[in-house]
Image (cartoon, rainbow, N blue to C red):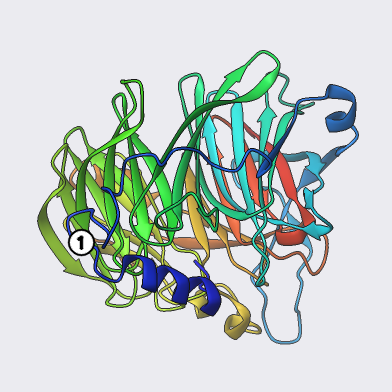
C-alpha cells in the first residue's frame, strides 16, 4: 500500500497521540462527524454511459510456459484443467482528468466490486460494480467517483457495499474512512452512513456475520470491528497492529492479519480482537506495494510482496512457498507478488511486470485435511497470455470468475470452466 509524504505527515499530526481509538483534542474516533462534503462523490448509474465503457471479447486464454534464457515467451499451452476465457475489458474511471487504477476487488455471488486509486500525489478514487448474471456478457452497472479520496478496499455484504479509503475531507478527524452504499436494482446509492477510523487509510475489509472488519494502516494502524446493525456505523473494538496489509478468516471465531515493517502474521480472536498468536513471516517489506492474505479450508495463501507466494497455516507454519526466481529465469527481478487468489487447484498471482502467473496448488488439499508441509506442493504452470507487456497489481477469483486489475488499463474479466 503506497505512502505519500504530504498525506503521511498530515495524518501523523492528526493521530500522533491516538490511544484506544482517541485523537487529541477531538471526540472519539469511530463516531461520525456531522457531515462530509456533498460534492466529494459522483454516482453514475446510467446504463447507456456505463455500457459504453465495456469492450466485449471472446478470447480463450492459454498459459505461456515459464520464461527461460533464449526463449522469453514459449508457445501457449492449454490451461491446466480449466478453460479460461477473456470475456470483457472495462476501461478505468477518470476523476477530474486523472485516470485512476484498480487496486482491490471483492467478488460476492454474481457481483464484483472494484476499488480504484491514483498512483501519485493527487487524491482521486472510484468504485465500479460488475454484474456477472450472464458470465459471458458481464455488465458495468454502477460507478462512483471520489474527488478527494483514494479508494483502497471494497466489500460487498448482503445488499450493501462498503468502501474503505483515505480522504482529506476536512470533516474527518483522521484520513481513514469507511462509507456504506446500498446496491439496488438501479445501482449504488449512498446511505449517508459512514465512519471515520484511526490511522490514514483502510487497507482491507472483511465480514464476520453481520459485522464488518476493517484493517487500517500504517501509522497507529490496526483492526476495527464495526457494528452495522444500528442507526449509525460504530466501532465496537480495535486492536493495534503495525503496518497491516490484509486480513482473512480461518475460523468462525478467529481472523488472521498480515503486516509489514516488522513482517508478521497475527491471529486474533473475534469479536474482541484479542491477539492470540504472532508469527514472523518473510515479505511485505515494500512500503509502496500491496500485500494480501486469502483463506480457504483454514489454509492461508499469502501474496507477500518481496516474499513471493506463501502457503501457511493460521499459526504461521510455512507449508510451501515460491520465490520470484521460481516464476522466471529471465526477469525474476521485475516481479513483485502483489496478490494471490485461489480457486480449486489453481492459484493466480498478480506478478507486476510478469502479468498473471498460474500455479498448481494441488498439495493444498492434503494440507487442509491434515497433511504436512510439502516444499514441492506448488508448481508454476506459467503466465496467462494477455497482451505482451501486460502488468497486474491485483487479482481475485471466486465463483468461476477471475478479475484482474491491470493498473491504468482498467480490469480484465475472465470466466473459468472446468474441462
Residue in the picture at 80% in, 43% down? 89
The image shows residue 133 at horizontal and vertical percentages of 68, 19
- Name the residue at the top extreme: 185
Q: Is residue 337 visible?
A: yes
Q: Is residue 367 above or below residue 107?
A: below
Residue in the picture at 11% in, 58% down? 277
The crowd level at tag 1 (other Cα within 10 Å; few <14, some 14-19, many 20+) is many
- Name the residue at the front extreme: 25
User: Which residue is under mark 1?
Assistant: 316
The image shows residue 113 at horizontal and vertical percentages of 60, 36
| Quadrant containing the C terminus in the rendered view | top right
Which of the 4 image quarters holds residue 275?
bottom left
Q: Is residue 200 above or below residue 404?
A: below
How many discs appear? 1
Which of the 4 image quarters holds residue 33?
top left
Q: Nearer the viewer, residue 79 or 222?
A: 222
Q: Is residue 361 visible?
A: no
Which of the 4 image quarters holds residue 259?
bottom left
Residue in the picture at 66% in, 50% down? 404
The image shows residue 35 at horizontal and vertical percentages of 50, 38
Residue in the picture at 67% in, 56% down? 124
**Left or right relative to 300: residue 290:** right
**Left or right relative to 365: residue 330:** right
The image shows residue 386 at horizontal and vertical percentages of 78, 56
Element at label 1: loop
Q: Nearer the viewer, residue 136 or 94?
A: 94
**Left or right relative to 271: residue 192:** right
Amino acid at each position: 500500500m503506497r505512502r505519500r509524504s504530504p498525506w503521511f505527515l498530515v495524518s501523523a499530526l492528526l493521530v500522533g497521540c491516538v490511544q484506544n481509538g482517541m485523537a487529541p483534542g477531538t471526540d472519539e474516533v469511530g463516531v461520525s462527524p456531522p457531515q462530509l462534503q456533498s460534492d466529494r462523490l459522483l454516482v453514475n448509474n446510467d446504463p447507456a454511459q456505463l455500457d459504453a465503457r465495456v469492450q466485449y471479447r471472446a478470447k480463450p486464454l492459454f498459459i505461456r510456459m515459464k520464461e527461460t534464457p533464449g526463449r522469453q515467451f514459449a508457445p501457449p499451452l492449454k490451461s491446466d484443467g480449466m478453460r479460461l476465457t477473456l470475456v470483457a475489458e472495462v476501461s478505468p474511471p477518470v476523476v477530474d482528468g486523472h485516470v485512476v487504477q484498480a487496486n482491490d476487488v471483492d467478488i460476492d455471488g454474481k457481483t464484483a466490486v472494484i476499488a480504484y486509486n491514483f498512483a501519485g500525489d493527487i487524491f482521486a478514487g472510484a468504485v465500479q460494480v460488475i454484474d456477472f448474471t450472464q458470465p459471458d456478457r458481464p455488465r458495468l452497472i454502477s460507478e462512483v467517483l471520489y474527488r478527494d479520496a483514494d479508494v483502497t478496499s471494497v466489500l460487498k455484504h448482503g445488499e450493501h457495499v462498503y468502501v474503505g479509503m483515505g480522504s482529506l475531507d476536512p470533516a474527518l478527524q483522521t484520513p481513514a474512512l469507511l462509507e456504506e452504499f446500498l446496491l439496488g436494482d438501479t445501482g449504488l446509492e449512498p446511505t449517508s452512513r459512514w465512519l471515520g477510523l484511526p490511522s490514514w487509510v483502510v487497507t482491507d475489509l472483511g465480514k464476520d456475520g453481520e459485522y464488518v472488519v476493517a484493517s487500517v494502516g500504517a501509522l497507529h494502524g490496526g483492526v476495527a470491528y464495526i457494528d452495522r446493525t444500528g442507526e449509525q456505523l460504530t466501532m465496537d473494538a480495535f486492536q493495534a497492529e503495525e503496518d497491516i496489509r490484509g486480513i482473512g478468516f480461518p475460523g468462525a471465531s478467529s481472523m488472521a492479519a498480515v503486516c509489514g515493517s516488522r513482517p508478521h502474521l497475527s491471529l486474533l480472536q473475534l469479536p474482541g480482537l484479542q491477539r492470540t498468536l504472532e508469527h514472523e513471516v518473510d515479505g511485505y517489506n515494500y512500503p509502496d506495494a500491496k500485500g494480501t492474505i486469502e483463506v480457504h479450508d483454514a489454509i492461508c495463501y499469502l501474496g507477500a510482496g518481496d516474499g513471493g507466494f506463501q502457503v501457511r497455516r493460521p499459526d504461521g507454519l510455512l507449508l510451501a512457498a515460491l520465490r520470484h526466481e521460481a516464476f522466471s529465469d529471465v526477469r525474476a527481478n521485475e516481479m513483485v507478488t502483489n496478490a494471490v487468489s485461489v480457486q480449486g487447484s489453481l492459484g493466480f498471482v498478480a506478478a507486476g511486470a510478469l502479468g498473471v502467473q498460474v500455479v498448481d496448488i494441488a498439495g493444498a488439499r492434503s494440507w487442509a485435511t491434515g497433511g504436512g508441509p510439502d516444499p514441492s506442493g506448488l508448481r508454476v504452470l506459467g503466465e496467462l497470455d494477455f497482451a505482451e507487456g501486460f502488468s497486474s497489481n491485483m487479482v481475485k477469483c471466486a465463483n468461476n470468475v477471475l478479475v484482474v486489475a491491470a493498473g491504468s488499463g482498467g480490469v480484465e474479466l475472465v470466466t473459468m470452466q472446468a474441462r
